[in-house]
Amino acid sequence: MNGYAPLAERMRPTKLDHYIGQKHLIGEKAVLRQMIENGALTSIILWGPPGVGKTTLAKIIANQLNRPFFELSAINSGVKDVREVIDKAKKSRFFNSLPPILFIDEIHRFSKSQQDSLLGAVEQGIITLIGATTENPSFEVITPLLSRCQVYVLKSLEQEDLLELVEKVFTTDILLKQKKLLLSETDALIRFAGGDARKLLNIIELVANNQNDDTIEFTNEKITSYLQKNPAQFDKNGEMHYDIISAFIKSIRGSDPDAAVYWLARMVEGGEDPKFIARRLIISASEDVGLANPNALMLATQCFEAIKMVGWPESRIILSEVTIYLATSPKSNSAYMAINNAQMLVRETGNLPVPLHLRNAPTKLMKDLGYGINYKYSHDYPNNFVEQQYLPDELAKKTIYSPQANQQESKIKERLNTLWKHKHK
């Protein structure tokens, strides 16, 4: 097969109708397809695991819209490269022509300054940005840039998508269609691919290149022997990435330290980024342990700082300690529910005025208008408390935070009831 591009490159589609998977985005009447067909493309970020077609989709979009296409990889590009592309984009535009597309692969690897260098060009419409990322853009893309882009989530390929791709390879690839290919079993092929089209194609190519028989047969045993790895191995870039972190968090929430440490081990063995695990522990400490054990958040935050100083393999011990601590802690989601309730009230009631006695009065005019009048300073009263209204008038009798039935919040509930005369029953 010398002289030919790899199978994954040979099979890269150039038209939307030949693209496999992501029907929720590019299927009939799906949002991204309609945007492309209407030629109304805005800057977007494609978020999903590797091998699901982010780069391919970006190139198809540029091809179908007949727009100039510039491509950068965040791994080896800097601010200078970004500015050079923006300058080329300016020069390539004619009167009333649509802006060129700048595709940035692994945009999450761009530093803040590199992402800042894109802002002006995106905002002014000099370029239409398509970013691709395997990491959550909420954490990895700066807010000003994220607010100027629509985020679309790409999913791991389903089994039917992978089998459709296999059929297409066997019948259309310029080299493999000349051979007699027999797909006897599919379990190992699908399992090892893990929803990743590129992995699937690499496996097919590996098996085909290592057989000189007239008939090339694909069996579970043959595929497993070629790959020489555990089919159950955690893949930090594949479909199981999301399933395993979900199982990890739910095990902590369910107070099962054995299961929680098991899923942690799966991630450690799979080479997961320890900072990713630590971030999830911080969220779990707030959302699931909460006020039942306020020390949990402090310990989870210290864990994040500690692993930045220590690194692998010792970080696994720190992560294990905090995982067990959270899993064995009492649980409360009262803080999570309280902010949900408060946000719902805000959406329902809008911008209610701040009561006059709570307003700031830095000028004489404001004081004359009654700002701050009759405000009672809590520290001037016994036990540093005096009853007064802090919510807007329309919400004065609303209860937003409800203490839950655990030792820590039982004390909180008792104190609140003493202060507020059983408002928090």
Image (cartoon, helix red, strand yellow):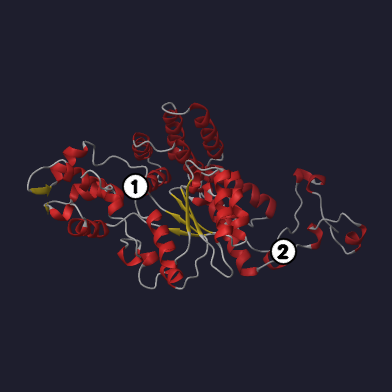
**Image coords of residue 77 (percent x, y):** 51, 43
Is 225 situated left or right of 312 in this image? Answer: left
Sequence-wise, the earlier of marks 2 and 1 is 1
Is 150 situated left or right of 179 in this image? Answer: right
Local crowd size for mark 1, using a 10 Å CA cut-off: few (<14), some (14–19), many (≥20)? many
Local crowd size for mark 2, using a 10 Å CA cut-off: few (<14), some (14–19), many (≥20)? some
Query: Against 26, is 405 above or below?
Result: above
**Image coords of residue 13 (percent x, y):** 32, 59
Q: Residue at x 52, y 31 (%)?
A: 308
Mark closer to the observer (2, 1): 1
Q: Residue at x 28, y 57 (%)?
A: 158
Q: Within the image, what quadrant is residue 34 found in?
A: bottom left
Q: Residue at x 81, y 53 (%)?
A: 376
Does the rendering let one see residue 195? no
Is 241 situated left or right of 329 in this image? Answer: left
Is 24 situated left or right of 279 in this image? Answer: left
Q: Residue at x 57, y 60 (%)?
A: 341
**Image coords of residue 108 (percent x, y):** 50, 46
**Label 2 sits on what residue type?**
Pro
* Residue tagged 1: 238
* Residue tagged 2: 392
In 3D space, how far apart are the residues under numbered discs 2 and 1 (Cα atoms)? Answer: 49 Å
Q: Give the quarter of the figure containing the C terminus.
A: bottom right
Dot 1 lies on which element?
A: loop
Which residue occupies the foreground of this view, 342 or 238?
238
**Image coords of residue 50 (percent x, y):** 37, 49
Which residue occupies the foreground of this view, 103 or 386?
103
**Label 1 sits on what residue type?**
Gly
